[in-house]
Structure formats: C-alpha cells, structure tokens
Amino acid sequence: MTDVGLQRDHNEDSLLVMPEYRVIAVADGMGGHRSGDVASQLAVSTLQDFFAMTVGRDGTWPFPADPNLSDEENYVVTGLRLANRRIFDRSLKTMADFGMGTTVVAALFTETAERVTIGHVGDSRCYRIRGGEILQLTRDHSLVSDAAYMAPWMSDEEVRQLPPNVITRALGIREDVLVDLVTDETRAGDIYLLCSDGLTGLVSDDQIHEVVTTLDDLEAACSALIQRANFFGGSDNITVVVAKVENVDDPFEATQPVPKAARTIAEDSTDDGDLEKPPKKPEEKKKE
C-alpha cells in the first residue's frame, strides 16, 4: 500500500509487486517540481520490464553478469543499474527533470523461497520479522547513517547535529551507481517488510514489529502501519510492501542465521568482498 500522507500534495513513492517472479520493491522519489514521482515510477517500471523479460528467459542483458554473484544477485544488481541509467538519461533531457533521483529497495525470492536477495540504494529499508525479533537488513545511505558507520567514535550528540534528511546515494544522480546487496536464508513464517522513510521516520521498529505480528492479514498490517504513521503526523508519503514466507523445504531450525554481510557492488566491477570496515579512530597527536 502507498499513501500520500497528511502534509504532501502528491505522492512521489512507487511500489512493485510481481508474485509471478517473486519480486517486490519500493522507491521514494526526490527532486524539484514533480520529477520525484517520475523517477520513482521509472525505477519500478524498469525493474518490472527487466524481470519480465529476463527471469527464466535467455534474453540479452544490458550489463555483463558478474561471475562472483549468484543468479538472484545478478538479477537484482543489473535491474537496479538499468533503472539508474534510465533515470539519469531522462534527467538530462529537460530542466524540469534535471537532478531528479529516487531511493529504492528491491527483494527477489528464489523459486522455492528458501533464500531472498535484497538490493538497495538510499534510505528505503528492508526489515525481517522472525518471531519476537525485527531486524533491519539494509543500512541507510544517509549522512547520519554514514557518519555513525564510518566514524563510530562520534557521540550521539554530534550525530544529532548532522542534517537528518541528506541522502548520500540514490538512483539517477550519477551515470553509475553503487548497489548494496544482502542475501538472507529464510524460515517458514518469516515476514519481509519494505518501506519508504515516510514510515520509519515516524514509526519505531518496535511498533512496526507489534503491528505486523498482531495482525495475521498482510493487507491489514500495511493499512495499520500507514494509519500509525499518519497518526504521528503523516509528514511524508508512506509506502509499505509486506511478503510472508509460508513454507520452505528446510524444516525450521532453532538457530537464526545471520544474514550474509552486505556488499557494495559498483558498476563495471567485480565483487571485492564484504563491505569495507569502518576506519579506526584517528590517533591524536601527542603534545610535546
């Protein structure tokens, strides 16, 4: 579901649900004039066309497949790269669209639903809800999140002084894009929730967990989450997509495996391992 919220005059969010290809996605557009909704719609329509033309088919891909990635990871990365290129090219055609972009988070499940691959750019999020735990699988590409990650020695007060709404990565801003990938092994009963920051900016993770686990119906859960965000002010567009794993081949295990570490995949490059570790705190110079 998607909702304009209470303080915006139009909706710049877009969503994608393709059950036949086991794909879901959320995009949150940004830009002057009305180009934000153009960017988000172009992102999801590009993903829709790409998956429809390539999954299970021998179609031609716009980028070479990366031998270091699984089939699902290649699908997700290539779809997002193609969306980025189309948005970027469109932004150069008219001044009204110049500088437009969109955040995006997309998830592709394997045919037997035993694994899911999540790709994202920006601060739209993916959560996994398993039993009594809610886990954010994506890391926001924002100034606040990057500072906390790359400079963990910063105090909470220093982080709070940073501008809260600055995005450091998005589709359409540059000709190429860095895509973060996360692969997760699923369990029966798992719920994966994709959303724009119109939800997470107003509704806490604990509240999201409470709503989703209290309501058995996924549509009712989406509606309740949007109502909760609007109750707290509805300051932005709100989009939620929820998918539940009803059955997998493997029996449920007591242990909960940690998702495969996020990796940043650059265009025209091979996967060079896990996301780089944050630097150590710089040593202070000794006074003589």
Image: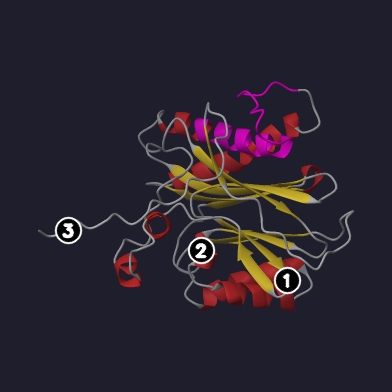
Amino acid at dot 2? Gly
Q: Is residue 115 shown above or below 229?
A: above
Q: In this view, does 110 lie to the left or right of 200?
A: right
Amino acid at dot 3? Lys
* Residue name at image x 67 percent, y 67 percent: 222
Tell me the CA gap for discs 1 and 2: 18 Å
Q: Is residue 121 left or right of residue 191?
A: left
Residue 220 circle label: 1
The answer to which of 234 and 61 lies nearer the viewer is 61
Q: In this view, does 176 lie to the left or right of 228?
A: left
Local SS, label 1: helix
Taking the view exactly as shown, the residue that stands out farthest to the left is 288
Name the N-terminal-most of marks 3 and 2: 2
- Are the residues at dot 1 and dot 2 in contact (C-beta closer than 8 Å)? no
The answer to which of 224 and 248 lies nearer the viewer is 248
Name the N-terminal-most of marks 1 and 2: 2
Task: Report the residue marked by disc 2.
Answer: 198
Q: Is residue 154 shown above or below 213?
A: above
Task: Report the residue marked by disc 3.
Answer: 286
Q: Is residue 262 shown above or below 49?
A: below
Residue 24 visible: yes
Residue 20 circle label: none
Q: Report the span colored magenta.
A: 59-85
* Residue name at image x 37 percent, y 36 percent: 98
